[in-house]
Image: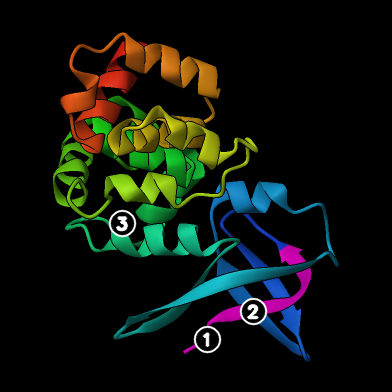
């Protein structure tokens, strides 16, 4: 219904902000990370929005990126996780960190979020592990500036994909390749298994 809201921040609260656009003030719930990134009142921002509909309430949720909004929608699809808990998770973990935690089955990382216990974290991992695919990690912006063409010169698509995924998580290409070289039969593994094996070695 509303794809995004662009306007000036006119109010900052614990879990929502007021954004003024053409004389209308939108109350938009968002993550603690997004609120923390706001420099102050009257800053112009853009938030990609999701309208949550209940019988007795309409609530607008907004996020600085489409990746975060799509992850929010995945989170609320999990049984027992509502919008407020989903925001708590996105306040504790970035989209990359959450994807890695789900892939690795890391309940401890997920329980950092307020309102999420071990049972809830396990349920989240079980329900999202097939939805947060390996390719999702590669879809994030490559902030490291690594030339993907150079990585692909390894000659193995699975190794190239694993290296790119590790780089997207903040490791250097050198660290990624060094770790993967320590994994027996790396060339014979598919990308998912290779990435999981590399992350286990790193941690």
On the image, the x and y values in percent for residue 134 come to: 29, 44
Q: Helix, strand or loop at disc 1?
A: loop
**Which numbered disc covers residue 2?**
1
Q: Which residues are magenta?
A: 1-11
Tell me the quarter of the picture where residue 123 sits: top left
**Which numbered disc covers residue 5?**
2
Which image quadrant: the C terminus? top left
Q: Residue furthest right?
A: 42
179 or 50, which is in the foreground?
Answer: 179
3D distance between C-alphas at marks 2 and 1? 7 Å
**Which numbered disc covers residue 195?**
none
Picture layout, residue 43 above or below residue 87: below
Disc 2 vs disc 1: Cβ atoms closer than 8 Å?
yes
Q: Helix, strand or loop at disc 2?
A: strand
The residue to which callout 3 is attached is 75
Q: Helix, strand or loop at disc 3?
A: helix
On the image, the x and y values in percent for residue 145 come to: 65, 38
Picture layout, residue 193 above or below residue 140: above
Q: Earlier in the sequence, mark 3 or mark 2?
A: 2
Q: Residue furthest top?
A: 182
Q: Is the residue marked by circle 3 packed among few (<14), some (14-19), or many (20+) residues within 10 Å?
A: many
Q: How many marks?
A: 3
Q: Does 123 sit left or right of 60 as displayed?
A: left
What's the magenta bit mostly, secondary-structure-wise? strand
């Amino acid at each position: 219904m509303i794809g995004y809201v662009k306007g000036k921040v006119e109010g900052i609260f614990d879990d929502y902000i007021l954004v003024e656009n053409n004389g209308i003030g939108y109350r938009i719930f968002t993550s603690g990370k997004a609120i923390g990134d706001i420099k102050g009142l009257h800053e112009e921002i853009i938030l990609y929005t999701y309208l949550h509909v209940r019988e007795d309430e309409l609530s607008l949720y907004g996020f600085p990126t489409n990746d975060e909004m799509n992850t929010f929608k995945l989170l609320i699809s999990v049984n027992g996780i509502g919008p407020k808990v989903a925001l708590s998770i996105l306040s504790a973990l970035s989209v990359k960190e959450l994807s890695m935690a789900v892939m690795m089955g890391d309940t401890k990382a997920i329980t950092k979020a307020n309102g999420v216990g071990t049972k809830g974290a396990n349920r989240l991992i079980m329900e999202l592990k097939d939805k947060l695919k390996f390719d999702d990690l590669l879809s994030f912006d490559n902030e490291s500036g690594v030339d993907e063409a150079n990585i692909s010169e390894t000659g193995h698509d699975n190794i190239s994909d694993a290296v790119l995924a590790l780089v997207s998580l903040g490791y250097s290409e050198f660290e990624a390749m060094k770790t993967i070289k320590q994994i027996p039969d790396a060339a014979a593994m598919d990308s998912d298994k290779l990435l999981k094996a590399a992350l286990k070695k790193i941690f």
